[in-house]
Amino acid sequence: MNCNNASLTAFSGNLDANKAQHLYRRLGLSASIETINAAVGRSASAVIDELINEAINMPTTTEPEWAYWDRSNYPEDSDSRNPIVNAELEEWRLTYTTAILTNNLRDRLSFFWSNHFVTEVRNYNAPTYLFGYTNCLQRNAIGNFKTFTSEIGLDNAMLYYLDGAYNNSGNPNENYARELYELFTLGEGNNYTEDDIIETARALTGYVERGDIQWSPVLFDESKFDATDKTIFGQTANFDYDGVIDNLFTERGEESSWYICKKLYEFFVHPDSDDLENNGNAAAVIDELAATFRANDFEIAPVLSQLFKSEHFFDDEAIGVIIKSPFDMFLNLINETGFTYDDSILANVYSTSELLGQEVFNQPGVEGWYRNRQWINNNYMIGRWLSCEMFLEIFYENNDEEFFDFAVALTPNASGENNPDVVATAILNKMLPKGIADDQLQIALDVFRDDSLANYYSPDGDSSWTLYNYADSSKQQIYNLLLHIIRQPEFQLK
């Protein structure tokens, strides 16, 4: 249930720690203690402008050596070729995982779009196509949605995934035309007909020149294009690919703007917007965002700026209401603690995410990953606990000193105090967007306290406990508390 009744009126205040963490959890994959501290006390509008401008101006990820190779660059026999191909695909997954972890809003968005304009790498298994696809996602992530829609439909990965590369005049293939409307721009059944799909498929014919060597770019073959008139959304013309896109955004701009703004809202603010009786002010907010989208010729940045700067986005009802996907959960853990990671840990992140139902670049179908509550069931819940424990154990074994540094950074003025509850509370507030339930707070505080040291922070003892005085045991205490935190319901939220 979405109880957020706030409007899109601009949030006029400065960021406190809670709102700063909320901002970075939604616009990126959380942030370090230092980044949050730097944002606290600043104007929310100024910080958001910086993040949006950073996303707009960020260069795409450096292309790999094999970015434009075709099959002629690989051994002919599959036994020799397949390990190379698999290594390149894994290399790019790792490169992209690093981008998602470190690039804030730009790759938060590119990852969002990868679950909107879905392809499945298992269907084409070509490293060069995967690179081209992610490059398209990054270039358009916060650009113009009409341009994005046009470019993604001619992307090699998409042309093979939804059979555009086999869409010939006289034998049109309807797969891409159907998903263009149903999933990519309008939403299922939203003011289009089966005839519109059939006619659109005819207009999209011709991008079938696949070359003599696999993994070559798909090109347009005019002889395979249906050059007769088509009627789409009540308009009749000799529509070609560009004509389909122009007609779509001219004749169905209202429907498309609302559908995309709804998806952005559910991703960044609250997963529930459909229940008209229990969705707070969501419908009115989405209507207003859609109007902004149309007024700005389908530019994405003005919509996000309006949303992120709003009272609605910063309302308490928007904080801690989205269930983390597996990828969110693991990468948030890395960013929020600042623990050192390497390629092997990131490879472990995406392989573990796969076990929990989120394989990067391999969604279960064109509709994308199921979201929010679908990440939680008995099997996945246990897997989420155990996998987070595994990562914490790796971090602790690699460098337990970082656990001490983490706590000190959270409590720079209290690290010398003898009250362990101050330190434990700071860690809880950092890791849990809404804190912890009242009836669980004392349990968490008790987990942090080391019973063998009780005399040293008891008012009746010598009161000599501080993080510094008992650094070795403090590391273990922090580790124990983090192990406890990752099993709390609140940890599953962002």
Image: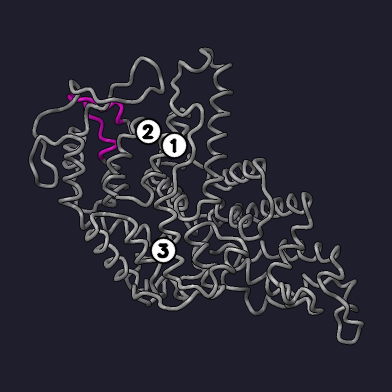
Residue type at mark 3: give it.
Asp
- For the question of whether residue 271 can be seen, the reply is no
| Secondary structure beneath label 3 | helix
| Secondary structure beneath label 1 | loop
Q: List x then y, in percent, for residue 283.
A: 31, 69
Closer-to-camera residue (366/248): 248
Horizontally, is 247 left or right of 14 in the view? Answer: left
| Secondary structure beneath label 2 | helix
Q: Residues within 10 Å of mark 2 (few under 14, many from 20)?
A: many
- For the question of whether residue 401 can be seen, the reply is yes
Q: Residue furthest top?
A: 76
Q: Is 256 included in the stretch rendered in magenta? A: no
Residue type at mark 1: give it.
Glu
Q: List x then y, in percent, for residue 168.
A: 22, 25
Q: Which residues are magenta?
A: 164-177
Residue identified by numbered label 1? 120
Please tell me which residue is depicted at 33% across the width and 32% down the height of the picture: 159
Q: CA distance from mark 3 to mark 1?
A: 34 Å
Quadrant in which residue 195 is drawn: top left
Q: Is residue 224 above or below residue 256?
A: above
Horizontally, is 249 left or right of 283 in the view? Answer: left
Residue type at mark 2: give it.
Tyr
Give the numbered dot on residue 49: 3
Q: Is residue 258 above or below residue 89?
A: below
Q: Residues within 10 Å of mark 3 (few under 14, many from 20)?
A: some
